[in-house]
Amino acid sequence: MANEAVLIENPTQIVRYTVADNAGIAKYTILKLSSDPNTAAASAGADVFAGIAMETKTANDGITEISAAINGAWGLKTNANTGITLGGICSLSGANLIKQATEAEMVTGGIVGKVYETASASEVVRVRVGLIG
């Protein structure tokens, strides 16, 4: 996996999700909710944000749980088509990518967090995960 999140400030809220045994997920991969309460690596803009993997999950290792951070400050990469403005709310935009959130994403669970610096396309930006106020 490429473009994994970069930890800036340690998270204080960690949750556990069920994950498929055959899933391979790198540490600091952005996760999506795949069903209640299952998770997988995010892969599309329409995914619902679940957190950031705090451990590596090796495929077919017999483990079916993974820890995920749901807060903290992270360096996240914007997609190749758009930047994000300072103070903007971001959403998922594919595998380990974010973009400026739309109004519709704010009510459907696609929000990742609040952006603390202006970013151009394909740039890593500081995001306060889980915070939108």
Image (spheres, helix red, strand yellow):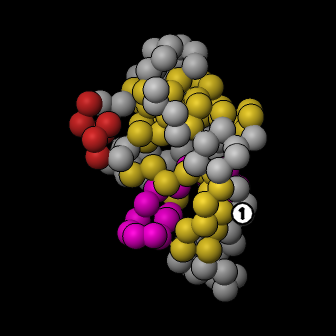
Marker count (numbered): 1
Image x and y of residue 4, in percent = 64, 45
Is 68 drawn above or below residue 82 in the view shown?
below
Residue most toward the left?
104
- Residue at position x 58%, y 19% from top? 116
Image x and y of residue 59, in percent = 64, 75
Report if residue 34 is visible in the image: yes
Magenta-span inclusion, residue 31 = yes
Residue 54 as seen in the image, left or right of residue 36: right
Residue most toward the bottom?
62
Residue span colored magenta: 25-40
- Residue at position x 50%, y 27% from top? 114
Label 1 crowd (10 A; few <14 / some 14-19 / many >=20): some
Residue assigned mark 1: 56
Residue 102 as seen in the image, left or right of residue 1: left
Is 123 drawn above or below residue 112 in the view shown?
above
Residue 55 as seen in the image, left or right of residue 65: right
**Callout 1 secondary element:** loop
> Hey, what amino acid is under mark 1?
Thr
Report if residue 80 is visible in the image: no
Is 60 drawn above or below residue 38 in the view shown?
below
- Residue at position x 48%, y 17% from top? 87
Image x and y of residue 111, in percent = 41, 39
Magenta-span inclusion, residue 38 = yes
Taking depth in this image into account, of 61 and 63 the one nearest to the observer is 63
Image x and y of residue 117, in percent = 58, 15
Taking depth in this image into account, of 37 and 77 the one nearest to the observer is 37
- Residue at position x 44%, y 21% from top? 88
